[in-house]
Image (spheres, grey):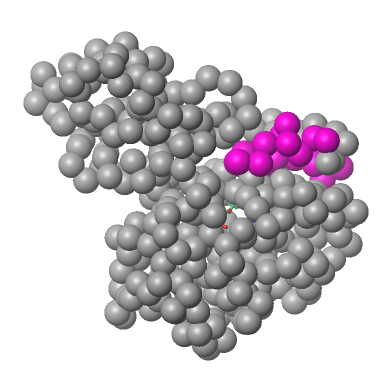
Amino acid sequence: MITRIVNAKDGLDEAVSLIKNGELVVFPTETVYGLGANAYDAEAVLKIFEAKGRPQDNPLIVHISDASQAREVARDIPEGYYRLAEKFMPGALTVVLKKSERVPYVVTAGGDTVAVRMPDNETARELISRSFPLAAPSANRSKHVSPTSARHVYDDLEGRVPLILDGGECRVGIESTVLDLTSDTPVILRPGAVTAEMLAPVLGIVPGSGKVIGIARSPGMKYEHYAPNAEAYAARDAASAAEFYDKCAAEGRRPVLLFDDVHAAELGARERISLGGDVEDFMRSVYAALRLAERDHDVIIVQTLEGGGRAASVMNRVMKAVGGKMI
Ligand code: TXA
Ligand code: MG
């Protein structure tokens, strides 16, 4: 199969026909690129798992073009959903609801719940409104770093998908927050740019964390995710990063530092890929930096950020990328 990258607006008509014909299309979102299929077509959805090499017991997010479209894919929707939708949709928030009969079990990995998200990208929403709700995971090979550009997708899925809609670089840079609304109290199953602090005033309660409860509800959490093809470590601070870098270099290995510009002077002439100047820059650029780093380096040393909120969400991904290894 030939894989083409086409400007998102130019490729929209073709993308609509492909989806209607039960084929896959990669589309841009504000978080990461998605690998989409008609969520109502079990056969089309199976192609997603095949193209990604993803285990079928990990459920997919269903992308909708309008918050009210949740009524097609979910049932018994709690009132809290609509309050969240008003504030965070379109956006980087995925909400887990009870699934409707229209959604086949291949989408939900056999479960009775469905994850729903309205992406903040016009092309994505137009594609959905002109075809179907789209079941879509991140458009990377299973276990690799999520893609934040069309080129990243091509590097992973060339020959496995017919069309990649190029919408430029993703604005947010890490996957959406996943919030389960089907449990007694709301639970964050995956942290993201929409934080517990932001959700609390809308929910009227601070959501719990999937790290403590609800693990069984988020099958994705048991898999290793986001890992680059190189040995990777999180650094306690710039000094320990510099020391470890020098040790690796002395052994003839090719280390690289992924650090923000604040630490530039401290790290001196050592090779560094910039993660920008603040937490939003860090979030937006960290996956691209990991993919760039793995090309020419065998040791990747990533900065850690202190604090809660978005810093903690990015660190959740960094710790997965490094497999929990700290120096
Ligand atoms: O930002 C995003 O969420 C991106 C873009 C493309 O929308 N998508 C994404 O999909 O990250 P994926 O498949 O890579 O991650 C979906 C996560 C997985 O951890 C999965 O286990 C969880 O959501 N999930 C999906 N359906 C679920 C359900 N019914 N109950 C609990 N967790 C669910
Ligand atoms: Mg993924």
- In this rendering, does residue 317 appear at all? no
Is the C terminus in the top left, top right, bottom left or bottom right quadrant?
top left
Comparing 122 with 38, the one in front is 122
* Above-or-below relation of 314 to 144: above
Stretch of the chain drawn in magenta: 182-201
Comparing 66 with 180, the one in front is 66
**Residue at image point 44% right, 23% down:** 304
Comparing 292 with 100, the one in front is 292
Can you give x and y, in whole percent of width and height, for residue 193 in the image? Answer: 60, 41
Taking the image as shown, residue 276 lies to the left or right of residue 76, namely: left
**Residue at image point 53% right, 52% down:** 31
Taking the image as shown, residue 282 lies to the left or right of residue 197, namely: left
* Above-or-below relation of 265 to 234: above
**Residue at image point 72% right, 46% down:** 179
**Residue at image point 39% right, 15% down:** 237
Taking the image as shown, residue 9 lies to the left or right of residue 247, namely: right
- In this rendering, does residue 65 appear at all? yes
Which of the 4 image quarters holds residue 76? bottom right
Can you give x and y, in whole percent of width and height, for residue 119 in the image? Answer: 62, 60
Magenta stretch: includes residue 199 = yes
* Above-or-below relation of 300 to 62: above
Can you give x and y, in whole percent of width and height, for residue 147 in the image? Answer: 41, 54
Which of the 4 image quarters holds residue 69? bottom right
Taking the image as shown, residue 182 lies to the left or right of residue 214, namely: right
Is the N terminus in the top left, top right, bottom left or bottom right quadrant?
bottom left
* Above-or-below relation of 106 to 206: below
Which of the 4 image quarters holds residue 308? top right
